[in-house]
Amino acid sequence: MAWTVLIEEVRGSGDRLRWGTAPSAGARNASFDDREQAREEALRLTAAHFPANPWSERDRQVYRISPDEYLVNVDGATTDFHFRVTVAERVEPGREEPRPVEDAQPDPHFLQSFRPFL
Protein backbone atom coordinates (compact mmCIF):
# COMPACT_ATOMS: atom_id res chain seq x y z
CA MET A 1 0.00 0.00 0.00
CA ALA A 2 1.39 3.41 -0.93
CA TRP A 3 0.07 6.80 0.08
CA THR A 4 0.40 10.05 -1.85
CA VAL A 5 -0.67 13.68 -1.53
CA LEU A 6 -2.84 15.22 -4.25
CA ILE A 7 -3.39 18.92 -4.85
CA GLU A 8 -6.38 20.07 -6.89
CA GLU A 9 -6.70 23.69 -7.97
CA VAL A 10 -7.89 26.04 -10.69
CA ARG A 11 -5.38 26.06 -13.56
CA GLY A 12 -5.15 28.36 -16.59
CA SER A 13 -6.41 31.89 -17.04
CA GLY A 14 -9.23 33.91 -18.58
CA ASP A 15 -11.80 31.75 -20.37
CA ARG A 16 -9.51 28.73 -20.07
CA LEU A 17 -9.81 28.17 -16.33
CA ARG A 18 -10.15 24.51 -15.37
CA TRP A 19 -10.04 22.39 -12.21
CA GLY A 20 -7.22 19.85 -12.13
CA THR A 21 -4.31 18.36 -10.26
CA ALA A 22 -1.27 20.53 -9.69
CA PRO A 23 2.39 19.88 -9.11
CA SER A 24 3.09 20.28 -5.41
CA ALA A 25 6.09 21.71 -3.63
CA GLY A 26 8.26 18.59 -3.55
CA ALA A 27 5.46 16.03 -3.31
CA ARG A 28 4.73 15.42 -7.01
CA ASN A 29 4.60 11.65 -7.40
CA ALA A 30 5.93 11.28 -3.84
CA SER A 31 5.03 8.01 -2.23
CA PHE A 32 4.72 7.38 1.50
CA ASP A 33 4.67 3.92 3.11
CA ASP A 34 2.94 5.35 6.14
CA ARG A 35 -0.35 7.25 6.07
CA GLU A 36 0.77 9.51 8.94
CA GLN A 37 3.79 10.67 6.89
CA ALA A 38 1.46 11.54 4.01
CA ARG A 39 -0.81 13.44 6.43
CA GLU A 40 2.17 15.44 7.71
CA GLU A 41 3.14 16.31 4.13
CA ALA A 42 -0.45 17.34 3.33
CA LEU A 43 -0.51 19.71 6.30
CA ARG A 44 2.90 21.15 5.28
CA LEU A 45 1.62 21.77 1.75
CA THR A 46 -1.30 23.89 3.03
CA ALA A 47 1.35 26.55 3.68
CA ALA A 48 4.13 25.60 1.21
CA HIS A 49 2.09 25.19 -1.99
CA PHE A 50 1.77 28.31 -4.11
CA PRO A 51 -1.15 27.85 -6.51
CA ALA A 52 -1.15 29.11 -10.09
CA ASN A 53 -3.92 31.56 -9.14
CA PRO A 54 -3.99 34.18 -7.74
CA TRP A 55 -0.75 35.77 -8.90
CA SER A 56 -0.44 38.01 -5.85
CA GLU A 57 -1.37 36.31 -2.58
CA ARG A 58 -2.48 38.51 0.32
CA ASP A 59 -3.70 35.90 2.80
CA ARG A 60 -4.80 32.28 3.12
CA GLN A 61 -7.18 30.36 5.38
CA VAL A 62 -6.85 26.60 5.92
CA TYR A 63 -9.78 24.33 6.81
CA ARG A 64 -9.39 20.69 7.84
CA ILE A 65 -12.25 18.76 6.22
CA SER A 66 -11.06 15.41 7.59
CA PRO A 67 -7.74 13.99 8.83
CA ASP A 68 -6.91 13.37 5.14
CA GLU A 69 -8.22 16.53 3.46
CA TYR A 70 -7.75 20.30 3.65
CA LEU A 71 -9.37 23.18 1.81
CA VAL A 72 -7.20 26.31 1.43
CA ASN A 73 -8.75 29.67 0.49
CA VAL A 74 -6.22 32.08 -1.02
CA ASP A 75 -7.03 35.78 -1.07
CA GLY A 76 -5.45 37.56 -4.01
CA ALA A 77 -5.06 41.23 -4.84
CA THR A 78 -8.17 41.25 -7.06
CA THR A 79 -9.87 37.87 -6.63
CA ASP A 80 -9.88 34.76 -4.42
CA PHE A 81 -9.20 31.13 -5.31
CA HIS A 82 -9.02 27.85 -3.42
CA PHE A 83 -7.18 24.57 -3.64
CA ARG A 84 -7.66 21.18 -2.01
CA VAL A 85 -4.94 18.99 -0.47
CA THR A 86 -5.86 15.30 -0.06
CA VAL A 87 -4.10 12.18 1.22
CA ALA A 88 -4.91 9.27 -1.08
CA GLU A 89 -4.03 5.61 -1.36
CA ARG A 90 -2.36 4.80 -4.65
CA VAL A 91 -3.70 1.58 -6.19
CA GLU A 92 -3.10 -0.33 -9.40
CA PRO A 93 -6.01 0.35 -11.80
CA GLY A 94 -8.36 -2.62 -11.89
CA ARG A 95 -6.04 -4.82 -9.83
CA GLU A 96 -6.75 -4.09 -6.21
CA GLU A 97 -9.86 -4.38 -4.13
CA PRO A 98 -10.75 -1.18 -2.34
CA ARG A 99 -9.65 -1.36 1.28
CA PRO A 100 -11.88 -0.08 4.04
CA VAL A 101 -10.57 3.16 5.44
CA GLU A 102 -10.81 3.06 9.21
CA ASP A 103 -11.53 6.75 9.70
CA ALA A 104 -13.59 7.46 6.59
CA GLN A 105 -16.50 8.68 8.69
CA PRO A 106 -16.97 12.46 8.61
CA ASP A 107 -16.07 14.41 11.71
CA PRO A 108 -19.28 14.61 13.83
CA HIS A 109 -18.55 18.26 14.72
CA PHE A 110 -18.42 19.07 11.01
CA LEU A 111 -21.80 17.39 10.46
CA GLN A 112 -23.33 19.29 13.41
CA SER A 113 -22.56 22.57 11.67
CA PHE A 114 -25.02 21.52 8.92
CA ARG A 115 -27.82 20.53 11.33
CA PRO A 116 -29.80 23.78 10.78
CA PHE A 117 -29.89 23.02 7.04
CA LEU A 118 -30.92 19.35 7.29
Image (spheres, rainbow, N blue to C red):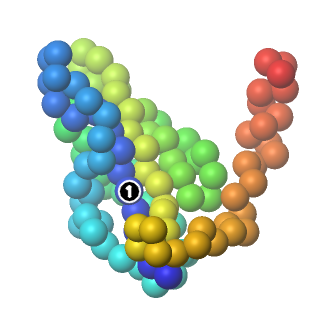
Residue at the image position 74 percent from the left and 40 percent from the top? 110
Q: Looking at the image, can residue 6 be seen?
A: yes
Q: Looking at the image, can residue 59 be seen?
A: no
Residue at the image position 51 percent from the left and 48 percent from the top? 70
Q: Position of residue 100 (x, y in %)?
A: 69, 69
Element type where label 1 sits in the image = strand
Q: Quadrant of the C terminus?
A: top right
In this picture, residue 104 sits left or right of residue 32:
right
In this picture, residue 81 sits left or right of residue 73:
left
Quarter residue 78 falls in: top left
In this picture, residue 17 sits left or right of residue 109:
left
Q: Position of residue 26 (x, y in %)?
A: 24, 66
Q: Amino acid at mark 1?
A: Leu
Residue at the image position 55 percent from the left and 42 percent from the top? 63
Which residue has dot 1 on it? 6
Up-down: is 118 above or below 82? Answer: above
